[in-house]
Image (cartoon, rainbow, N blue to C red):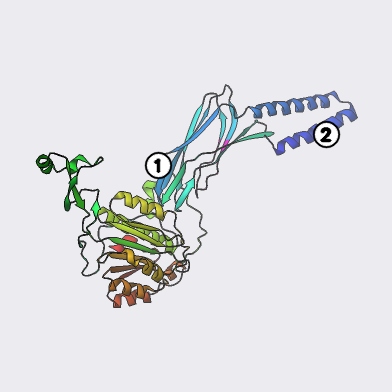
Amino acid sequence: MKVRKTFWVIIGLLVIFLAAGRQFQYQLLNKVVYVLLVLILISWIWTRFSLTGIQFSRKARSLRKETGQVFEERLRLENKSAFFKSWIEIIDHSKLPGQNGSRIMAWVGRGELRHYSSYTLLTHRGKFLLSPTEIKSGDPFGLFEKTVTLESNQSLLVLPIQFKIHNFSLPPGYLPGGKSIRRRTAAITPHAAGIREYLPGDSMNRIHWKKTAQRGMLITKEFEEDPQSDIWIILDSHVLSHSKTMQDAPIPKADRFWSIKEKSTYQLPMDSYEYAVSTVATIADYFIRIGQGVGFRDIGKNSLILPPEKGYRQLEKIMESLAFIAADGEQSMETGVLSHMSQIFPGSLVILIGTDRSTGLERSAESLKLRKIHPVFILMDSDSFTGEKRTVSSNAALLKQMGVIATTIHYKDSIADHLE
């Protein structure tokens, strides 16, 4: 229980009236002293039980959102005690930027249920713990205050924003089909590899019924992976490659109509790395939707590698990885590409995403082409993210002279338009 400033004011008055009563022998002053003592006692007892019977909960429709979306949370407070509460303050201490779940409620009646919604515009990637929540209450005279802290293990995962594209420029001569991989797979594909004896756990739809009838035992079909070239997305996360401008503008507040009125106007921050991460998310979503295997390599501090796979499970793994990565790497793009070259099959498409400050772009392109790997470069214009005049990227021009597809994205440019 906390003592508030009003308590010390009452104590001061108590001392003054007590001294005056002793000095002037006024009965009225002594009665005022008794009233103040009773007031302190009542306030202490009131505060002692001010949070008894209070139940609080917070629920969200979804704990997985993208930047630019509005996170809606439902907060519920119920007074199950036999007495009303003069005031209750709810303070949200979660680390979610722009959160506005704090409220003050007055005169919460016996058995009364109150609830409200909190709307937060998501502007930062990452994982945010929706806790702790502090609940305060006290007496109506403001002498004492009681606080209860509620912990929760609920957390919100904020993914990078991705833009829907319906086409992607491929390098000349690139074909999505490739050589037979000759690698067994548990999935059913159009490419049968042979038959074998049935093993426990094999799916019934893989049984070769004709051979089973001929041999008098269960025979299972085996399949090879679909011979399609892989798509590798390599992100340059070197700490010196990217640039950003610190924006002092306050985080905009979201209300219940914000997602309808203003979602399309959300602008990525003035940070080349955030543009690069959103570009990775957009490209991965496109190739997963058209059924190709996508792999991801982050040339950052932890050198994250996700081998190529198909399906939306792979997209979820890429998106979750993008939620946590940062521009903290020490390897150059050239070093990262050369160290990863042995894991890329000839005929694959490699999309390299960095900035015009990324080092070794030309040598990376030459090394990839020598191994019959098709490179595509998407570069962020660093100067445009520092408020300087837009420039023509010399690296992009050199890459184009080598016959390599290269495009440059500036601050406030549409990522989807550039990729299509």
Is residue 164 visible in the rendered structure shown here? Answer: no
Query: Which stretch did the figure color magenta?
Result: 89-104
| Image position of 86 (left or right of 245) | right
Compare residues 189 and 115 and report the one nearer the observer.
Answer: 189
**Identity of the amino acid at label 1?**
Ser
Mark 1 or 2, nearer chain start = 2
Is mark 1 in CB contact (under 8 Å) with mark 2? no
Label of residue 238 in the image: none
Residue corresponding to mark 2:
16
Q: Quadrant of the C terminus?
A: bottom left
* Mark 1 secondary-structure assignment: loop
Question: How many residues crowd around disc 1 within 10 Å: few (fewer than 14), some, or many (20 or more)?
Answer: few
Choose mark 1 or mark 2, whichever is in front: 1
Residue at 24%, 53% in the rendered image: 184
Query: Where is residue 374, by image quadrant?
Result: bottom left
| Image position of 420 (left or right of 239) | left
Is residue 172 visible in the rendered structure shown here? Answer: yes
Residue corresponding to mark 1:
62
The alpha-carbon separation of the residues under discs 1 and 2 comes to: 58 Å
Residue 329, x across and y down, in percent: 46, 64
